[in-house]
Image: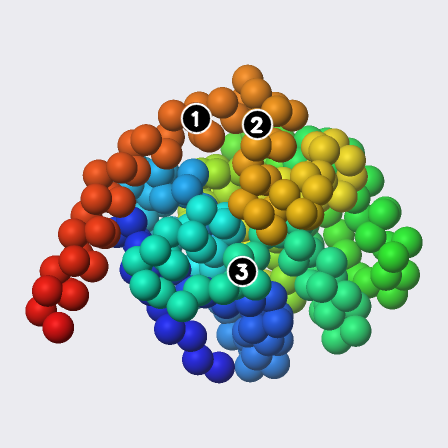
Amino acid sequence: MSCHRISVLKTVIDPFPISALNQYIGEAIASHKQRIIAHHNLHSVYLYHRDAKMRMFYERADIIHIDGMPLVYWARLLGYPVSRDQRVTYVDWIQPLLAMATAEGWRVFYLGGKPGVAARAAEIVCRQYPTLTIATHHGYFPPEENDTVLATIAAFQPHILLVGMGMPRQEHWVLDNLDKLTANAILTAGACFDYIAGAIPTPPRWMGRLGLEWLYRLISEPRRLGKRYLIEPWALLPLMIADVRSVLLRKGRS
């Protein structure tokens, strides 16, 4: 499977659609290899340029898919042939992923969310996929319980580990514990089980397709997300200018 990695905002992304991501996970499981699947949106790009540990995590990641229509629009403006279906958010991906896990008999472990939330989400998905093998653990555990959480994950022997602790904690946790994780596919999944459990309102999918999902989330959680959506993007302006200059230089040489 091939993918043309592209560079935007001084980082890299792999414009994979859902079908290709599922195929990639299947290949990792079949070959008994371990792969880290990360994602980028404007928030993660902001953190990437301010957090050395985030940069280390992305250097270790095997795939960095697009999670955010602004990156799709920006890549298009820079001349990259990126399509709408190459924007993959977990709200859209989790159902096809769990359906494939059920069909293939893959074990799935979700780590994240407040106590009880992930378990409630697992009950919901098990009603949809009765033969799915899934286990969960909340993400609100103190450092002294980390080894116990790792032992719980190891005992379950998941093929897929979804870590949903929010950025940058989930990326830091994966990086810190990578040598103790045996899952074939490790995915940083944000709040995807919070949406399934109904703990966070799910944006209408038409808003996601138009790139307006951020507005719905901002209205739903203004205090928590105000800085992310209203202030952080302005800090990316120098990177955007650098991208435009790079494109103009390439065109000038051609």
Q: How far from the left and from the top, in percent, is residue 179?
A: 45, 58
Can residue 127 be seen by looking at this rendering? yes
Residue that mark 1 sits on: 230
Residue at 77% in and 66% down: 99
Please provide percent x and percent y for residue 1: 48, 82
SS at circle 3: helix
Q: Residue furthest top?
A: 223
First reached walking from the N terminus: tag 2 or tag 3: 3
Nearer to us: label 2 or label 3: 3
Say whether marks 2 and 1 touch (CB < 8 Å): yes
Q: Nearer the viewer, residue 181 or 110?
A: 110
Q: Mark 2: which amino acid?
A: Leu
For mark 3, what is the residue? Answer: 84
Q: Amino acid at mark 3?
A: Arg
Name which residue lies at 73% across and 70% down.
Answer: 100
The C terminus - image quarter: bottom left
Mark-to-mark CA distance, 1 and 3: 24 Å
Measure how far apart labels 2 and 3 are at the Cα level: 22 Å
The residue type indicated by label 1 comes to: Leu
Please tell me the numbered disc located at residue 218: 2
Residue 242 % position (x, y)? 19, 48
Would you place residue 96 above or below residue 211 in this image? below
Sequence-wise, which precedes: disc 1 or disc 3?
A: 3
